Image (cartoon, helix red, strand yellow):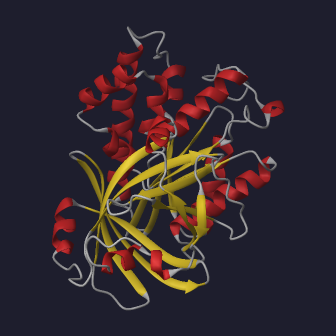
């Protein structure tokens, strides 16, 4: 059985309602059982429970996030009993959306109340798809009429959209779907992203990789749409055209664990499958690490910029350059780097800069 849990999020009037309907229809046709977890805020506000009716916004957020966690737990429990071997739980917004409505102090208090960390809440979902509000690039279509819980002006909706992106940046599979095309094409782009993630037709990863000058870390860390994540990566024994790795991802005492398998198909395309591991599974697989490859430790800066999601890897043994990667759904998609990121050259397809090759170099070796 394969159960995936994904989030469809985005700013007000971004197309979530249509997207959820499209996902349910199209994935059902592909043989999935699709379970939709309804948006918690809309049902609470419509029922009279709102930030302005509760004692404080913080108390409201405690109620909402606790209810949301419980709803998702029930859906996961129910999914485990179902006979289909392909099940997708689609959450109409996820827990980290609520961060956009709180200040840092409130969010810290709510996390303590729930007994959760930010990493646990963010990375509990397998993928996150953000639909940009019509208030950014399609203002003529922005309306309050199709959601009684919506109240934001165009300016407020655009600012809120930015805060949602900030909240989810750092997730290992975060995609932003903008308004560069008409709405129907926007929905098709979303479905391409969803089906690519699920591995339908072919689980291809189209990845471009660049060597960049060592980045200005202070600038990166000052960006609201940038999150720093520590990664410890080990490689398991595998065939020459297949790469199997386990990854410990997080910070401090907050970690998530993943098993990834990649097989080269052609050109820039690689077939990739990924699943989450428990701490115990990770420790067991760690015993199967390839002794010829050393463990890699790196700091990853996840940056959302101009609707694209960059992953900048800084290695402790490099002080003059870093690796910047971006995953795309089409090989001809233009990459829009921020001016602060200075590209030295593209190394897509160059085996020299694969992490597995870096892991094979003597400890302390640089380029």
Residue at the spot x=39%, y=10% of the render?
A: 56
Residue 289's image quarter? bottom left
- Residue 54 appears left or right of 270: left
Q: Position of residue 263 (x, y in %)?
A: 47, 83
Q: Is residue 173 visible?
A: no
Closer to us: 168 or 5: 168
Residue 191 can be seen in this image? yes
Percent across and percent down for residue 96 are 43, 37
Direction bottom: furthest residue: 240
Query: What percent of the width, then of the height, locates residue 83?
Result: 39, 67
Residue 110 lies, with reference to residue 349, above or below; the image says: above
Q: Residue at x 31, y 80 (%)?
A: 360
Q: Residue at horizontal 82%, vertical 48%?
A: 182
Instruction: Identify which residue, 198 or 148, lies in the foreground.
Output: 198
For the N terminus, give its image quadrant. bottom left
- Quarter of the image with the C terminus in it: bottom left
Residue 345 location (% of width, % of height): 60, 68
Q: Classify residue 64 as left or right of residue 287.
A: right
Give the residue at the far front of this rendering. 320
Q: Depth check: give the residue in front, 104 or 11.
A: 104
Q: Nearer the viewer, residue 366 or 39?
A: 366
Tally the marks.
0
Looking at the image, residue 265 lies above or below residue 77: below
């Amino acid at each position: 059985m394969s159960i995936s849990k994904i989030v469809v999020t985005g700013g007000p009037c971004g197309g979530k309602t249509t997207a959820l309907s499209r996902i349910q229809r199209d994935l059902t046709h592909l043989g999935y059982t699709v379970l939709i977890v309804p948006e918690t805020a809309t049902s609470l506000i419509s029922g009279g429970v709102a930030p302005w009716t509760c004692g404080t916004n913080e108390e409201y957020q405690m109620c909402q996030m606790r209810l949301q966690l419980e709803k998702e737990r029930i859906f996961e429990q129910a999914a485990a009993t179902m006979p289909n071997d392909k099940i997708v739980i689609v959450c109409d917004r996820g827990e980290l959306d609520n961060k956009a409505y709180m200040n840092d102090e409130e969010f810290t208090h709510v996390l303590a109340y729930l007994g959760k960390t930010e990493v646990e809440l963010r990375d509990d979902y397998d993928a996150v798809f953000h639909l940009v509000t019509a208030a950014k690039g399609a203002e003529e279509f922005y309306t309050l009429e199709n959601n009684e819980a919506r109240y934001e002006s165009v300016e407020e909706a655009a600012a809120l959209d930015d805060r949602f992106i900030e909240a989810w940046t750092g997730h290992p599979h975060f995609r932003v779907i903008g308004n560069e095309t008409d709405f129907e094409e926007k929905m098709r782009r979303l479905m391409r992203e969803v089906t690519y993630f699920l591995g339908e037709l072919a689980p291809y990863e189209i990845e471009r990789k660049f060597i960049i000058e060592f980045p200005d870390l202070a600038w990166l860390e000052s960006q609201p749409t940038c999150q720093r994540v520590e990664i410890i990566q080990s490689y398991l024994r595998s065939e020459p055209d297949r790469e199997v790795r386990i990854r410990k991802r997080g910070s401090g005492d907050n970690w998530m664990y993943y098993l990834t398998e990649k097989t080269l198909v052609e050109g820039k395309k690689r077939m990739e499958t990924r699943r989450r591991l428990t701490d115990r599974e990770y420790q067991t697989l760690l015993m199967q690490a390839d002794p010829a490859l050393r463990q890699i430790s790196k700091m990853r800066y996840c940056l959302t910029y101009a609707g694209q999601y960059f992953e900048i890897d800084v290695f402790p043994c490099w002080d003059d350059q870093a690796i910047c990667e971006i995953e795309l759904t089409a090989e001809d998609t233009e990459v829009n780097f921020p001016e602060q990121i200075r590209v030295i050259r593209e190394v897509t397809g160059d085996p020299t800069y694969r992490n597995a090759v870096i892991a094979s170099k003597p400890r302390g070796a640089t380029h």
